[in-house]
Image (spheres, rainbow, N blue to C red):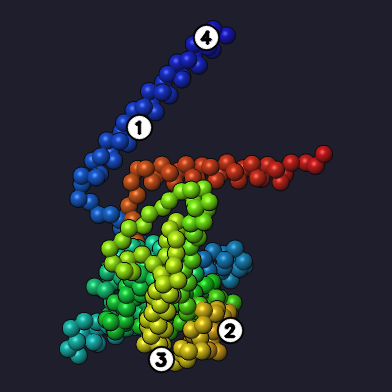
Amino acid sequence: MEFLSQYGLFLAQAMTIVVSVGLIVLLIAAASQRHRGESNGHIEVHKLNERYKELRETLRDATLDPALRKESQKAEKKAEKKKAKEEAKAAKKQVKSGSEEAEEQPKLYVLDFDGDIRASAVEQLREEVSTLLGELRETDEVLLRLESGGGMVHSYGLASSQLQRIRNKGINLTVAVDKVAASGGYMMACVANQIIAAPFAIIGSIGVIAQLPNFHRVLKKNDIDFEVLTAGEYKRTLTVFGENTDKGRDKFKEELEDTHVLFKQFVKENREVVDIDNVATGETWFGQRARDVNLVDSLQTSDEYIQAKLDTHGVYELSYVPRKNWQQKLGIAAENALERSFLKLWQAALTRPKQ
């Protein structure tokens, strides 16, 4: 027992040393990273043609008779060789005809935008768009899979401007809404050449909302004064703790109305087919109804759109991955560990036999 006690003490001391050294290394690494002029992130690209091909091959291998599978593989290889031969022949012919560049297969670039209230994903979107603009050709397309219930006007205005950069280059832009694109989300969507939506995706909400609590009467009841000092008649219209006035409310409402006017004007400029006075009521529509009022062009999921392009386009999924510092990595690791612990407890509770 004395040996086990001493051995346990040794292990505890060793672990303490290891953890301490590890923390020191992490702190040194973090400090050195702050002083390096390294990029804040990187671009990841995945060719979806290859991904779907591998999935189909896996399914075929699991379901086809071995003899039929062998014949199918031979036929596919033969078709691929024929296609490659035809492409090479066409390229050679084009070069002989005096063209400087051989014609390449058009590309479809797939981006994702998962929007919160602050449209935080705009930081990734701007990097993705900036990367694409130098490579896009007239025959290429961009598909944005958009999901957002809206948020801050200025943030979603910037996100819309990023998409406008694609349109300004003369590239066909499609926005796909599988779940929701409302308010600021629709502000982004309307920039596209076409909008596709799932039948029950939520679309619209072309309106403006602002709300805040006011604790002035609570403070007054407890003899607490809250002073609001401003320079400029309308520097502060409504406050959370100060006493609000009818004049301040009227001005705030005026600003909301002006924002709504600008929102309607923006949608109308980008989608002339929309009867803006009919749809700019703050209402939302499911995809089927949204098509009836021209808020979307067709009912289609992003998956269906991508699948239809696999034979004619090189389809590439593009995403910008920001570099995380060590604090963020530790936080994510802790969050994942906690999530796994809760999942194990939940599974244990579900499988526990009833008394």
Query: Does residue 187 show up?
Result: no
Residue that numbered label 3 is attached to: 272
Please name whichever residue, 241 or 211, is drawn nearer the observer in this view of the structure: 241
Secondary structure found at label 2: helix
Residue identifier under label 1: 23
Hey, which quadrant is residue 33 in on the image? Answer: top left
Of mark 3 and mark 4, the one earlier in the sequence is 4
Q: Which of the 4 quarters of the picture holds residue 2? A: top right
Q: Is 320 left, or right, of 205 in this rendering? A: left
Give the foreground label among 1 and 3. 3
Classed neighbour count for the residue bearing mark 4: other residues with Cα under 10 Å, few (<14), some (14–19), many (≥20): few
Q: Which residue is labeled 2 in the image?
A: 288
Q: Amino acid at mark 3?
A: Glu
Q: Position of residue 59 (x, y in %)?
A: 57, 66
User: Are there few (<14), some (14-19), or many (20+) residues within 10 Å of tag 3?
Assistant: few
Residue 26 in view (yes/no): yes
SS state under label 4: helix
Amino acid type indicated by mark 4: Phe
In the foreground, 229 or 52: 229
Which badge, 2 or 4, is on the more N-terminal residue? 4
Closer to the chain start, of discs 2 and 3, is 3
Give the mark toward the camera: 2 or 3: 3
Picture coordinates of residue 95, whole percent (x, y): 20, 85
- Point out which mark residue 3 bears: 4
Q: Amino acid at mark 1?
A: Leu
Q: CA distance from mark 2 to mark 3?
A: 20 Å
Check the image and name the residue furthest to the right: 355
Q: Quadrant of the C terminus?
A: top right
What residue is drawn where x is 33% and y is 63%? 123
249, 301: nearer the viewer: 249
Q: What is the distance, in whole Å, between disc 3 and disc 4 at their CAs?
A: 84 Å
